[in-house]
């Protein structure tokens, strides 16, 4: 069964940090580009970040650029999001989601999200 | 950023009804558009990508059309399991962006 399981959410102080993890099973994680997407009641769904299969290339939404860092460990089938300088407006449910699929010689760089985790709630409040 | 606007924001319909949801982009996304279904407390589920390609395992009553800036998701005969919120998403240009959602409720 294909699964993505997020962890690491919780309560953080404004200006604080959290590190989210996402562990994959049931599919070839190392062949997929990966993403973080968040959802707030007010702002809806927001794509945050994308990472290449090797981890060498990353992209960020302006709202988190310079504060959040995406990374991955293919050996552990894990994706991470280091969140620093947290703000109240970062309060949301955070999802990891699969992106483009890559074979040995090419990637489809698909920008849609086929597989999703169940989400982890981050609350930023004093 | 490309703004995605869905209409309506909510609709009421009965089982068996044909339902259409529109998504308009502020600039062309060619056909790089996806549709998702989300139920309360769950993650979104991919229904269609590239505007009209049905994701594996998704019932054929779901269909998508459009290109450029105007897209439509159609459910040909609404089933009880289809009452949910639907989102469009463009992946033509970073940052990838979503519509605000359309809630489909039981009449």
Image (cartoon, coloured by chain):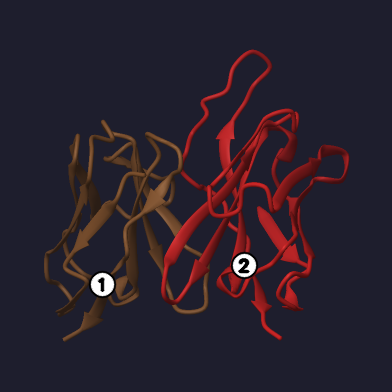
Q: Colour of chain A?
A: red
Extreme right residue here? A75
Vertical arrangement, residue A41 with respect to residue A55, above or below: below
Of tags 1 and 2, the one toward the viewer is 2
Read off the residue under disc 2. A118
Label 2: which secondary element: loop
Quadrant of residue B50 within the rendered picture: top left
Q: Is residue A1 visible?
A: no
Is residue A71 rendered to the left or right of residue A44?
right
Residue shown at 87% from the left, 39% from the top:
A75
Quadrant of residue A11 within the rendered picture: bottom right
Residue shown at 60% from the left, 75% from the top:
A88
Q: Where residue A101 sits in the image (x, y, percent)?
A: 59, 31
Label 1: which secondary element: loop
Q: Where residue B75 sits in the image (x, y, percent)?
A: 20, 60
Read off the residue under disc 1. B79
Badge 2 sits on which subunit? A
Badge 1 sits on which subunit? B
Quadrant of residue A52 within the rendered picture: top right
Label 2: how many Cα within 10 Å (few below 14, some 14–19, many 20+): many
Is residue B106 rendered to the left or right of residue A26?
left
Q: Colour of chain B?
A: brown
Distance from Cα at disc 1 to Cα at disc 2: 24 Å
Residue A34 is marked as none
């Amino acid at each position: 069964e294909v699964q993505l399981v997020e962890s690491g959410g919780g309560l953080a102080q404004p200006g604080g940090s959290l590190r989210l993890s996402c562990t994959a099973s049931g599919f070839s994680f190392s062949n997929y580009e990966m993403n973080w997407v968040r959802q707030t009641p007010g702002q809806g769904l927001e794509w945050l970040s994308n990472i290449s299969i090797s981890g060498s290339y990353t992209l960020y939404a302006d709202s988190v650029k310079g504060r959040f860092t995406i990374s991955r460990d293919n050996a552990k089938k894990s994706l991470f999001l280091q969140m620093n300088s947290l703000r109240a407006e970062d309060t949301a449910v955070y999802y990891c989601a699969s992106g483009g699929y890559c074979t040995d010689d090419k990637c489809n760089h698909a920008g849609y999200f086929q597989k999703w985790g169940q989400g982890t709630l981050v609350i930023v409040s004093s | 950023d490309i703004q995605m606007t869905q209409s309506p924001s909510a609709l009421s319909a009965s089982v068996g009804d044909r339902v259409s949801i529109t998504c308009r982009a502020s600039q062309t996304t060619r056909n790089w558009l996806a549709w998702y279904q989300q139920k309360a407390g769950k993650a979104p589920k991919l229904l269609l990508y590239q505007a009209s390609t049905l994701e594996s395992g998704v019932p054929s009553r779901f269909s998508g059309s459009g290109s450029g800036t105007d897209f439509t998701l159609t459910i040909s005969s609404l089933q009880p399991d289809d009452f949910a919120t639907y989102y469009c998403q463009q992946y033509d240009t970073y940052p990838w962006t979503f519509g605000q959602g359309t809630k489909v409720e039981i009449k």
